[in-house]
Image: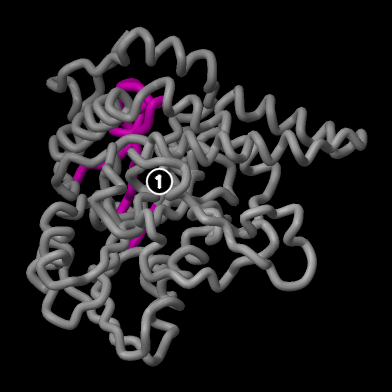
Amino acid sequence: METSTPGASDQPKTPRPPALRDLVRAEFAPTTAYLNTASHGLTPARTADVLREAVRETVEGRIDMTRWFAVIEQARARFARLAGLTPDRVALGAAVSAHVSLVAGSLPPGAEVLVADGDFSSLVNPFAVRADLKLRTAALDELADAVRPGTALVAVSAVQSADGRLADLAAVAGAARAHGARTLVDTTQAAGWLPLDADAFDYTVCGAYKWLLCPRGTSFLTVPGDGGDLVPLQAGWIAGERPWDSCYGTVEELARSARRFDLSPAFLPYLGAERSLSLVEEAGQEAIGAHDRALAARFRAGAAGLGHRPVPGDSAIVAVPRLGGAAEALREAGVEVSVRAGNLRAAFHLYNTAEDVDRLLAALPRG
């Protein structure tokens, strides 16, 4: 049953479709109004079950690495489908910054990298620490116009972490192509609710522990079919075409797929990731996105009715400037949000309801 709160009573109801509602009921049981997926997603029941069993296997000495690696390959394939690619174009890692460092380390000295003002540090800093690169910034809405002859790479988050703004990726990709520049898109705050065609960009990176609901320690890099300009600087035994024959000495033959860019995957996070990604596939990114955006729109309208000025847009992440100080009181009221760049940041995902939104609005001060 939907409820009404000050500032939201005139908003349309936003019930979940029955199939999504039943799926969520079977997988999630939050004890708070958890509106902080932009920091970390909740763990589905199916994922928790697999993790518990895997830990038991390590305790009891029943470790089956062959089977575990097979499950990890299933996780790679699931992410590839969500990204619109084949698995041979997906590399595994543990953090976005490691993938970005690979891209940064493969650029020639003097290369110009263009990024958006205030973008997430894990996307920006690997370029900044290379003193021989030219790092240039531009406002997010001016990024496409800022691409120029001589720009080697444009790196941008599809959705901005600090305030939820969406990048005009089509314009950025078009401008990059026109000037012969490569593109790197961070989909960490998008994958899971905002379907994107990774094939439209040279590289994408994704931390999967947010909207994809995976354990922390899972991340994905997508590359062109030929690997692009990347040098497999981090290649270990797992990056060999025949890993079990590449354990000692020089790896004689690197994998013919994006697996040559893999970091050796952590077993527990990736065993869980396979299950979490199965849930996102089952629910569908389009259905999840429609649900998330409807809740976000409800909150924007309600917050405006209370006299606040949320960052406009059609994003699952809603930031309210100068309201970050309310986060502590919200937590005491059982509402979990976050504070980024001084903004109160609320993030809405498949396990959230209109009641969660109204509970947030009821706990907010008037502007």
The correct choice, above or below, for 87 with respect to 248 in the image is above
In the image, what residue occupies the spot 74% across and 30% down?
52
Which is nearer the eye, 307 or 43? 43
The correct choice, above or below, for 97 with respect to 258 in the image is below
Residue that sits furthest to the left in the current view: 145
Is 139 positioned to the left or the right of 266 in the image? left
Residue that sits furthest to the right in the current view: 60
Whether residue 204 appears in this view of the structure is no
Few, some or many C-alpha atoms within 10 Å of disc 1 (few <14, some 14-19, many ≥20)? many
- Residue 178 sits in quarter: bottom left
Q: Pinpoint residue 239: horizontal percent, then vertical percent.
A: 62, 59
Element at label 1? loop
Q: Pinpoint residue 8: horizontal percent, then vertical percent.
A: 19, 26
Is 336 positioned to the left or the right of 74 in the image? left
- Residue 359 sits in quarter: top left
- Residue 3 sits in quarter: top left
Q: Which residues are magenta?
A: 339-367
- Residue 169 magenta: no
In the image, what residue occupies the spot 29% across and 23% down?
287
Q: Amino acid at mark 1?
A: Ala
Which is nearer the eye, 333 or 70? 70
Residue assigned mark 1: 38
Q: Pinpoint residue 213: horizontal percent, then vertical percent.
A: 50, 36
